């Protein structure tokens, strides 16, 4: 079941589960607790919901999220840094403006910002 939560700055669609829940106590590392809190706050859902979602993904055999391959990230970061260094040496100005990119995006998505 879905329901909508709205306030002055945003509207979110949240999933509401009517399944019976069993209380569990888990121990997490401090770094995990800090990250769990930040994720829950940024998504506007409870920490318990984050944990339930992670369990559902684990039981479904899905990966926790996209892009967790450290080697791939390292290659991408190295590539981006090399591009940045090369551009600084040439002192080439950007060929685009932020407002033009925004307008292009709005035109492609019919005014939606997602």
Image (cartoon, rainbow, N blue to C red):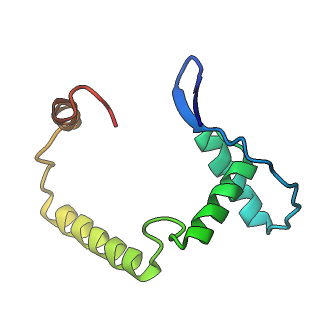
- 4 or 1: nearer the viewer: 1
User: Picture coordinates of residue 76 (x, y %)?
Assistant: 32, 73
Q: In the current view of this chain or complex, which residue is farthest to the top?
A: 8
User: Picture coordinates of residue 74 (x, y %)?
Assistant: 40, 78
**Rendered residue at 53%/21% (across/down):** 9
Vertical placement of 71 versus 53: above or below?
below
- 99 or 8: nearer the viewer: 8
Give left or right: position of 96 versus 111.
left
**Rendered residue at 14%/50% (across/down):** 93
Say which quadrant the C terminus sits in. Answer: top left
Q: Quadrant of residue 56?
A: bottom right
Q: Quadrant of residue 8?
A: top right
Q: In the current view of this chain or complex, which residue is farthest to the bottom?
A: 71
**Rendered residue at 89%/61% (across/down):** 25
- 34 or 23: nearer the viewer: 23
**Rendered residue at 69%/56% (across/down):** 52
Give left or right: position of 23 versus 4.
right
Say which quadrant the N terminus sits in. Answer: top right
User: Picture coordinates of residue 31 (x, y %)?
Assistant: 73, 65
Vertical placement of 82 versus 55: above or below?
below
Vertical placement of 22 versus 44: above or below?
below
- 38 or 11: nearer the viewer: 11
User: Picture coordinates of residue 84 (x, y %)?
Assistant: 25, 64
Circle count = 0
Give left or right: position of 91 versus 16.
left
């Amino acid at each position: 079941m879905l329901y909508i939560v709205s306030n002055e700055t945003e509207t979110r669609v949240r999933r509401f589960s009517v399944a019976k829940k069993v209380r569990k106590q888990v121990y997490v590392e401090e770094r995990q607790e800090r990250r769990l809190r930040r994720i829950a706050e940024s998504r506007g859902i409870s920490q318990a919901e984050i944990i339930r979602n992670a369990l559902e993904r684990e039981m479904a055999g899905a990966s926790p999220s996209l892009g967790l391959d450290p080697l791939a990230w390292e290659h991408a970061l190295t590539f981006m840094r090399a591009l940045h260094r090369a551009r600084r040496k040439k002192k080439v100005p950007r060929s685009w403006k932020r407002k033009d990119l925004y307008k292009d995006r709005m035109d492609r998505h019919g005014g939606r910002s997602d």
